[in-house]
Image (spheres, rainbow, N blue to C red):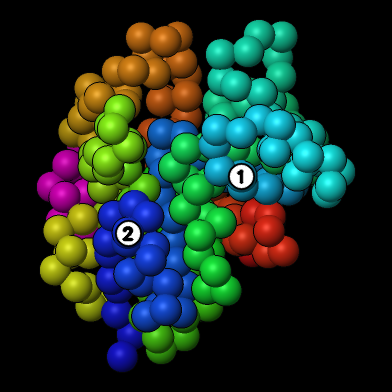
Amino acid sequence: MASVLSEWGMAGVEALRARVEVLVIVDVLSFSTAVDVAVSKGAIVYPFPYGDRDAAQIAADRVGAELAHPRRATGGQFSLSPASLLSIAGGTKLMLPSPNGSRLSVACGTTPVLAGCLRNAAAVAKAARTIARDGVIGVVPAGERWPDGSLRPAIEDLLGAGAIIDEIALPCSPEAQIARDSYRSAGQDLHRLVRASVSGCELTEAGYSGDVELALEQNISLCAPMLVGAAYRAA
């Protein structure tokens, strides 16, 4: 029976990947938003787990991709900052390490994967329903991590997942229903909530308020980035 399940983070991917027809990874600040910005401009984005830059460079060289720089890098290089990708050219191959969305993307095995955020919620929901047909869709809010490596639930990902689940418009598990209802309840307060969240404040205080504003744009993108051959491309 067609329905939606939702679980958090890596454990959520591991719990759902064998039970669903498609997984939607939701990392609003900032992986999924960055992927949407780049792929909507015709770029090809390779996710890579964050932490080993030498290994990421080897992987990038193997596929002929440019390795994204750390967000704090200067000089206009491409990075995890969605704003840095607004000028990316179609056909560019970008290796994009991130500690959450990338890590989850590569853990999904053979299950089809979409990258969802507030910007493309309707487009991703439509693509997920097409892929799943009458099957089950899994929506995974990525969350952040505490210093000890444990999951920190992030409200921006809960709300982004809820926006997508709302657009999917299928029967929900209790976990998916709570995400959907949180999004509906936020209403006109959604922007304030995300800006004031831990992740929103961290980015703003680091000088990346523009990334938060890009992530808050709702349903302005018709792109549904799908992981094909180890890279996100337009579905």
The residue sitting at 42% across, 25% down in the picture is 213
Q: Which of marks 2 and 1 precedes in the sequence?
A: 2
Which residues make up the magenta segment? Answer: 180-188
Residue 2 visible in image: yes
Q: Is residue 152 left or right of residue 69?
A: left
Magenta-colored stretch includes residue 187: yes
Q: Which residue is disc 2 drawn over?
A: 11
| Quadrant in the picture for the C terminus | bottom right
Q: Is residue 107 left or right of residue 68?
A: left
Magenta-colored stretch includes residue 198: no
Q: Give x and y (percent) for residue 28.
A: 40, 40
Type of amino acid at the residue the image marks with label 2? Ala
Q: Give x and y (percent) for residue 151.
A: 27, 43
Q: Which residue is disc 1 drawn over?
A: 48
Asked whether 183 or 73 is in front, the reply is 73
Q: Give x and y (percent) for residue 182.
A: 16, 50
Dominant secondary structure of the residues highlighted in magenta in the image? helix
Residue 7: quarter of image: bottom left
Type of amino acid at the residue the image marks with label 1? Phe
Q: Give x and y (percent) for residue 131.
A: 53, 78
